[in-house]
Amino acid sequence: MASVKLTNVKKIYDKNVVAVHDFNLEIHDKEFVVFVGPSGCGKSTTLRMIAGLEDISEGTVEIDGEVVNDLQPKDRGIAMVFQNYALYPHMTVYDNIAFSLRLQKMPEDVIYEKVTNAAEILGITEYLMRKPRALSGGQRQRVAIGRAMVRDSKVFLMDEPLSNLDAKLRNQMRSEIILLRQKLDTTFIYVTHDQTEAMTLADRIVIMKDGFIMQVGSPDEVFDMPDNLFVAEFIGAPKMNIIKTKLVCEGGKYYVTPFGAKIAVDGDKGKELANRKAPGGDILLGVRPEHIQLATAADHAIPCTLVVDEMMGSELHLHVDTEDGTRLIVRVPTLDLDKDQRKTLVAGAKLYITFEGKAMHLFNPETEKNLLT
Amino acid sequence: MSQKEVTSKRHMGLKAANRVSNTAIYILLTIISIVWLLPFVFILLQSFRCETDRGMVGYILPKVWGFDNYIKLWNSDFRRWYINTFIIALVSAVLVTVIQLCMSYTLSRFRFKMRGPLMRFMLILGMFPGMLTMIILYRVLADLGLTQANAVPGLILVGFASSGMGYYVSKGFFDTIPKSLDEAARVDGTTRLQVLYKIILPLAKPIVIYTILTAFMGPWGDYVFAKYVAFGTSAGYNVAVGMYSWLSNDQIGNWYTTFCAGGVVVAIPVTILFLCLQKYYVEGVTGGAVKG
């Protein structure tokens, strides 16, 4: 159980390629932090620097108050689960899990107890005498987690542990990781490129891009109040619609004017704009697909044409083109549609859409920063 | 004829054709193996020939059988040569294997300055025939006092000195073992050396066996360097050089059958080694190529 503190951490490869810029983060004891971002954003590199598998070019990493920059991985009090499981192929599952304990010269009866205990929690007791190649992907990942569990480490590091599993198994393992976390009650640092994993698992999410931290916050914060356009588009699926439009202020009230419509920015966001006396002008307007509703022809409804309809089961994803050719995605719960309505939603259909002012996100088109953060 | 009969006849035709071609192939292979085995059988038979004429004869089956040649062999200088060869081959094999595997692991896993140029340099250097270095090597060994009667340590030195350059095959094999295994082991608490012998080597068993075998075989059958370094001193001969001296015009009449017996004795350890390790050897030669 420990906190992890990264101060001005940088990773510079040969030829001055900077993989991680000035990373500052304090991870609290027993916190579950997820690093998320597209590939090449430096999330795995950062994790590997914490693990001691990469040199730290600049800055310091502290675990439990101790600077660990120059410590070997084994001396840092960490356990790690790798994307490709990294099980030792020539050892049985039991030996794989017992490996680190034997290196610590623990008595065999203690090792036996720890291994069988971990195996029981993970439901792999019957496979203990098998070699990894005789296991399925999900079972292998459990063994990898078991191997990390028995080390009783201060910090649990996971590098895309679910990426090699199929979609169904991934969902199952995700909930198992949540249960595991409750049982282990230790500090977790988890790397993924999958925003769903990040949202469901994390206490705090660190969203990264090109080696920079774009935002750190709870799942609610990064979803409801993205700091910038990148975070807004990265979190949430399907991704947020971005519309070039103008912000106008009339009589102390703010409006946006997408596609000739005029929609009031109300709720807290409207008040905040008024408090800040925000100037009008060009903005980027972000609206999540689930916040757009189908409407009938009315003053503020936006006319558009349906291009693609994707049936997802519980919901329908409609890809529509507005009159000026902007492509938007609308997410409609299938329960909200009656049969006749559903039949009309085919490619080429003319629709009207609208959205509420409180669900809008406003970004500066130059800095791409949220106007309200 | 029904459709079923037609089909079954076609199937019979295919089977018959397969049988004919298989038979032809087996006959050919049998002939080739007989031709290939004949010299070995010949040597084996000659080694048991105990006639008064111990020179070359024009027939294969001995007229008088016995172990005289082996007894003569045991009482000759051969014992010394055999021990010499065994020491050279064994010590070289151990040193070459250790150096080569460490070198391969280093080049496969570590990234350091000049790694690329070093590998290219060794590749180019390896393209020159070893014989080119003979004169200067002799000079060096002579200055160190490692020639003639002291040829054994000299030949061991020659055997392992440049062994790191033979890293290609095992490095290729190590490259196919995921690096995350090393990393997992290091997180689990191993040192780099423990990673090598607890994780990598057990996984690379075929290549370790291959390295040991080739490292042993080189000095075991060496003739040119051994002859050069021992330079006419019987105490420094290995079996190849020693036994060849029996084939000179004035010796062959007396020593030919003993030479054959020596050939059989030389083949024994190598044959045993191969029989025990052949399963791994085949995997080792082909393993690195297809696993990547």
Image (cartoon, rainbow, N blue to C red):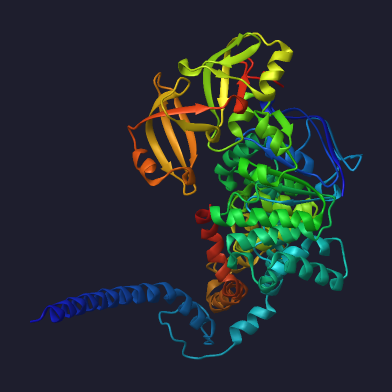
Q: Is residue B149 visible?
A: no
Q: Residue at x 40, y 79 (%)?
A: B58
Residue B115 percent coordinates (x, y): 67, 37
Q: Residue at x 46, y 28 (%)?
A: A353
Residue A103 percent coordinates (x, y): 83, 61
Asked if residue A74 lies left or right of residue A290, the reply is: right
Residue A237 lies, with reference to residue B23, above or below; the image says: above
Residue A213 percent coordinates (x, y): 71, 29
Asked if residue B272 lies left or right of residue B90, the reply is: left
Q: Quadrant of the C terminus of chain A?
A: top right
Q: Residue at x 55, y 19 (%)?
A: A263
Q: Between A150 and B228, which is closer to the camera in this rendering?
A: A150
Residue B245 percent coordinates (x, y): 59, 66
Q: Is residue B49 visible?
A: yes
Q: Between A121 and B146, which is closer to the camera in this rendering?
A: A121
Q: Residue at x 69, y 68 (%)?
A: A123
Residue A183 lies, with reference to residue B18, above or below; the image says: above
Residue B238's quadrant in the figure?
bottom right
